[in-house]
Amino acid sequence: MNNSQFSEIYKKLKEISTQGIKDAERINEKIEQELEEEIKNTPEFEAWKKSGFSLDHVFNIDERQHALLIRACQNSDVEMVKFLLGTGASVNVIAGEDNPFTIIIEKLYGKERAESILNLLLQKLTSHVQEGKESVNLTIKKAIERGNFKVFNELKDAGANFNIEAYEGCSLLKWAEMHKECTNKEDMEKIINHLKTAKNVKPSVSSEKSDATFWSKHKGKIALSIVTLFAAGAVTAFMFDLPIVALVLVASAVVTLMAIGIDKIRENSPATEVHEPSTNSESLSRTHSSV
């Protein structure tokens, strides 16, 4: 598929958007019925059809990648952006090194239509931050590169992670300082100040790690307390002529001591490798690999 054929697909969707059709099946039918056979015979169209005519499909056109929402942003086409977002297109879509935010941030600076599109995209920012890890990193880097404090602040409020690199060996703070002279200095200063603050805040120990450390340090005391309770209960049971209950409590105390002893032996064994508690993603990875 070439660029002119992709443009025909875009035009057809734009035409459909003016007809008030929002049902996905109806849109798909119109696409199949009204596009030229030359376009429908291309491998790229077949791939799009197999995706269920996904509005987030990334088209490979003349060795470049294109996506419908990104094209709408490139064209500053407010109505088409509204239509695509309203029928399920995702702001997380990536084509090459771009997503909808990076395109529109480049097109701002007093351009009313671009500003209108940005406001539409920002309505989806929370899901963008929560679901589009790779895509949101592109948005963060572009917002800093262009000194766009509005987008940067929205990202911050949505909980975006700024502990990433613009590229290998280049922190976001360094990235901001590199572009300071080419942007709105006042806005860039605000961005830089926040990045400096974020850099100086030491991450708190995770609850998972705290729990593991607490157990490691105090398991002996905890076990002794439990065994003492079991022993006291057993003595009381014997006093009230409840031998079965007493035996159960004694057995429980023995099992507790054995469990702690085994855990201690494993901890001190040179063949046992002790790991720091991992991040959630690493834990999930190990869980899947062991299943």
Image (cartoon, helix red, strand yellow):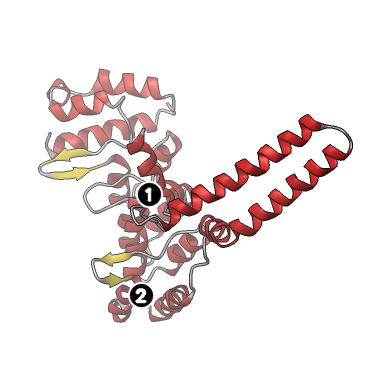
Residue projecting furthest to the right = 240
Q: Which residue is mark 1?
A: 282
Residue 55 seen by the camera: yes
Under circle 2, the secondary element is helix
On the image, the x and y values in percent for residue 129 come to: 44, 52
Q: Quadrant of the C terminus?
A: top left
Q: Which residue is mark 2?
A: 173
Determine the residue positioned at 64% across, 52% down.
Answer: 223
Q: Quadrant of the N terminus?
A: top left
Under circle 1, the secondary element is helix
Residue 123 seen by the camera: no
Relative horizontal placement of residue 21, taking residue 213 as reference (left or right): left
Q: Local crowd at mark 1 within 10 Å, few (<14), some, or many (≥20)? A: few
Q: Is residue 55 above or below residue 131?
A: above
On the image, the x and y values in percent for residue 6 come to: 19, 36
User: Label 2 is placed on what type of residue?
Assistant: Leu
Determine the residue positioned at 43% across, 33% down.
Answer: 87
Quadrant of the image occupied by residue 220 = bottom right
Front: mark 2 or 1: 1
Determine the residue positioned at 45% across, 59% down.
Answer: 160
